Image (cartoon, rainbow, N blue to C red):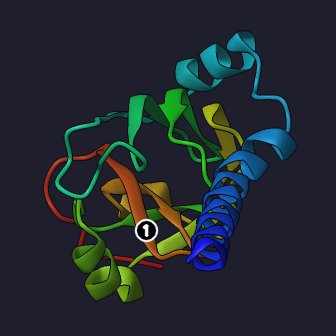
């Protein structure tokens, strides 16, 4: 019985340690966030703005974002925070999405802008081939685990054209 208890307790600690490592590693290897001046300059150049909110349907204690999104033709920035995690990507969608199921259902209509590598403020370069005006919503998605993190609508309505 004592050996079984030791095996179970050590196994449980291994699982807890692994989970903590998955959570902590992106924080430890994240590059420095953009400076407040860079974020303000991005906001000043924005064509559109939106808001990441914690209260979306599939946001929870480990998957959330909050702050002001600024969208220009060249860059998309966040003055705020997103929950730390691995392999985050920024997508643009013609429709507002706030659930994992909707993201997966509509992913074929979206465009991936790039990687999000910082968790307090970020700025992601927009490739020249993407017309941000053809989309309505920015979404942060965890590619590795298929998790919805957050979304911000930056234009009303539904976009009909895409690249």
Question: With 124 as the anchor, is 77 left or right in this view?
Answer: left
Q: Which residue is drawn at 44% across and 63% down?
A: 92
Q: Which residue is drawn at 30% across and 47% down?
A: 60
Q: Tell me the SS state at disc 1.
A: strand
Residue 21 visible, this orientation = yes
33 relative to 106, above or below = above
Residue 128 visible, this orientation = no
Give the quadrant of residue 99: bottom left
Where residue 131 appears, as percent x and y from the top left, is 51, 62
2 relative to 121, above or below = below
Residue, disc 1: 147
Can you say which quadrant of the picture contains the N terminus?
A: bottom right
Give the quadrant of residue 57: bottom left
Question: With 150 as the anchor, is 57 left or right in this view?
Answer: left
Q: Residue at x 76, y 26 (%)?
A: 34
Q: Which residue is drawn at 39% across and 31% down?
A: 66
Q: In the depicted view, which residue is nearer to us: 63 or 80? A: 63
Where residue 75 appears, as percent x and y from the top left, is 64, 43
In the displayed orientation, state which residue is furthest to the front.
1
Where residue 107 appears, as percent x and y from the top left, is 38, 82
Question: With 39 as the anchor, is 59 left or right in this view?
Answer: left
Give the quadrant of residue 112: bottom right
Where residue 158 appears, as percent x and y from the top left, is 17, 64
């Amino acid at each position: 019985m004592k050996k079984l208890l030791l095996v179970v307790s050590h196994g449980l600690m291994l699982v807890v340690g692994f989970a903590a490592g998955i959570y902590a590693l992106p924080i430890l290897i994240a590059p420095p966030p953009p400076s407040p001046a860079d974020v303000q300059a991005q906001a000043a150049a924005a064509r559109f703005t939106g808001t990441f909110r914690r209260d979306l349907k599939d946001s929870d204690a480990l998957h959330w974002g909050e702050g002001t999104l600024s969208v220009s033709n060249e860059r998309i920035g966040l003055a705020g925070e997103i929950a730390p995690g691995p392999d985050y990507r920024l997508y643009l969608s013609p429709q507002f999405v706030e659930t994992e199921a909707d993201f997966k259902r509509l992913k074929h209509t979206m465009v991936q802008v790039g990687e999000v590598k910082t968790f307090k403020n970020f700025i992601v370069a927009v490739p020249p081939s993407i017309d941000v005006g053809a989309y309505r919503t920015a979404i942060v998605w965890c590619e590795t685990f298929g998790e919805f993190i957050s979304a911000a609508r930056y234009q009303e309505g539904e976009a009909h054209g895409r690249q």
